[in-house]
Image: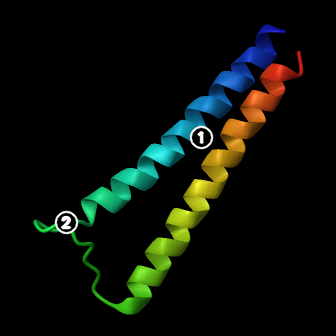
Amino acid sequence: MAGEYLWVVLLMVFGAWLLYWRKKRKYDRLNDHGIEEFGSYLEKVRADAFNTLLLWVGCVCLIAAVIMLGGE
Protein backbone atom coordinates (compact mmCIF):
# COMPACT_ATOMS: atom_id res chain seq x y z
CA MET A 1 0.00 0.00 0.00
CA ALA A 2 2.75 2.48 0.91
CA GLY A 3 4.70 1.40 -2.16
CA GLU A 4 1.77 2.23 -4.40
CA TYR A 5 1.53 5.72 -2.92
CA LEU A 6 5.23 6.15 -3.66
CA TRP A 7 4.60 5.36 -7.35
CA VAL A 8 1.65 7.77 -7.42
CA VAL A 9 3.73 10.57 -5.92
CA LEU A 10 6.64 9.87 -8.27
CA LEU A 11 4.34 9.88 -11.31
CA MET A 12 2.71 13.12 -10.20
CA VAL A 13 6.04 14.83 -9.55
CA PHE A 14 7.51 13.61 -12.84
CA GLY A 15 4.42 14.67 -14.81
CA ALA A 16 4.34 18.10 -13.17
CA TRP A 17 8.08 18.54 -13.76
CA LEU A 18 7.66 17.72 -17.48
CA LEU A 19 4.88 20.29 -17.81
CA TYR A 20 6.97 22.86 -15.95
CA TRP A 21 10.00 22.12 -18.16
CA ARG A 22 7.83 22.58 -21.26
CA LYS A 23 6.74 26.05 -20.10
CA LYS A 24 10.29 26.98 -19.11
CA ARG A 25 11.67 25.98 -22.51
CA LYS A 26 9.09 28.19 -24.19
CA TYR A 27 9.81 31.10 -21.83
CA ASP A 28 13.58 30.82 -22.37
CA ARG A 29 13.10 31.29 -26.12
CA LEU A 30 11.25 34.62 -25.75
CA ASN A 31 13.00 37.83 -26.67
CA ASP A 32 12.41 41.25 -25.07
CA HIS A 33 9.22 41.73 -27.10
CA GLY A 34 7.68 38.40 -26.09
CA ILE A 35 8.26 36.67 -29.43
CA GLU A 36 9.92 33.28 -29.72
CA GLU A 37 13.18 33.29 -31.66
CA PHE A 38 14.56 30.41 -33.70
CA GLY A 39 17.59 30.07 -35.93
CA SER A 40 15.65 28.26 -38.64
CA TYR A 41 12.25 26.86 -39.45
CA LEU A 42 13.50 23.31 -38.77
CA GLU A 43 14.58 24.37 -35.29
CA LYS A 44 11.06 25.70 -34.63
CA VAL A 45 9.44 22.49 -35.87
CA ARG A 46 11.73 20.37 -33.69
CA ALA A 47 11.07 22.54 -30.63
CA ASP A 48 7.31 22.40 -31.16
CA ALA A 49 7.41 18.61 -31.66
CA PHE A 50 9.45 18.13 -28.48
CA ASN A 51 7.15 20.46 -26.53
CA THR A 52 4.15 18.47 -27.73
CA LEU A 53 5.84 15.26 -26.60
CA LEU A 54 6.54 16.78 -23.18
CA LEU A 55 2.89 17.85 -22.92
CA TRP A 56 1.53 14.40 -23.75
CA VAL A 57 3.94 12.45 -21.54
CA GLY A 58 3.37 14.86 -18.65
CA CYS A 59 -0.41 14.60 -18.96
CA VAL A 60 -0.29 10.80 -19.26
CA CYS A 61 1.81 10.61 -16.08
CA LEU A 62 -0.61 12.83 -14.17
CA ILE A 63 -3.66 10.94 -15.44
CA ALA A 64 -2.04 7.60 -14.59
CA ALA A 65 -1.29 8.82 -11.07
CA VAL A 66 -4.89 9.93 -10.58
CA ILE A 67 -6.20 6.60 -11.87
CA MET A 68 -3.83 4.68 -9.59
CA LEU A 69 -4.92 6.82 -6.65
CA GLY A 70 -8.59 6.31 -7.48
CA GLY A 71 -8.16 2.58 -7.91
CA GLU A 72 -7.57 1.99 -4.22
The numbered disc on residue 43 is none
Q: How is the image coloured?
A: rainbow
Q: Is residue 13 above or below residue 18?
A: above
At 40% from the left edge and 83% from the top edge, which residue is drawn? 43
The residue that mark 2 highlights is 34
Circle 2/circle 1 CB separation < 8 Å: no
The residue that mark 1 highlights is 15
Q: Residues within 10 Å of mark 2 (few under 14, many from 20)?
A: few
User: Residue 7 appears at what percent x and percent y?
Assistant: 73, 25
Q: Residue furthest right?
A: 71
**Residue 4 appears left or right of 57:** right
**Residue 71 appears left or right of 40:** right
Q: Is residue 42 above or below residue 15?
A: below
Quadrant for the N terminus, please: top right
Which mark lies nearer to you, 2 or 1? 2
User: Residue 3 appears at what percent x and percent y?
Assistant: 78, 15
User: Residue 54 appears at what percent x and percent y?
Assistant: 56, 57
Name the amino acid type tagged 1: Gly
At 27% from the left edge and 86% from the top edge, which residue is drawn? 39
Ranked by sequence position, the earlier of labels 2 and 1 is: 1
Whole-angstrom CA distance, mark 2 to mark 1, is 26 Å
User: Residue 48 appears at what percent x and percent y?
Assistant: 48, 73
At 26% from the left edge and 59% from the top edge, which residue is drawn? 28
At 52% from the left edge and 47% from the top edge, which residue is drawn? 18
Name the amino acid type tagged 2: Gly
**Residue 16 appears left or right of 44:** right
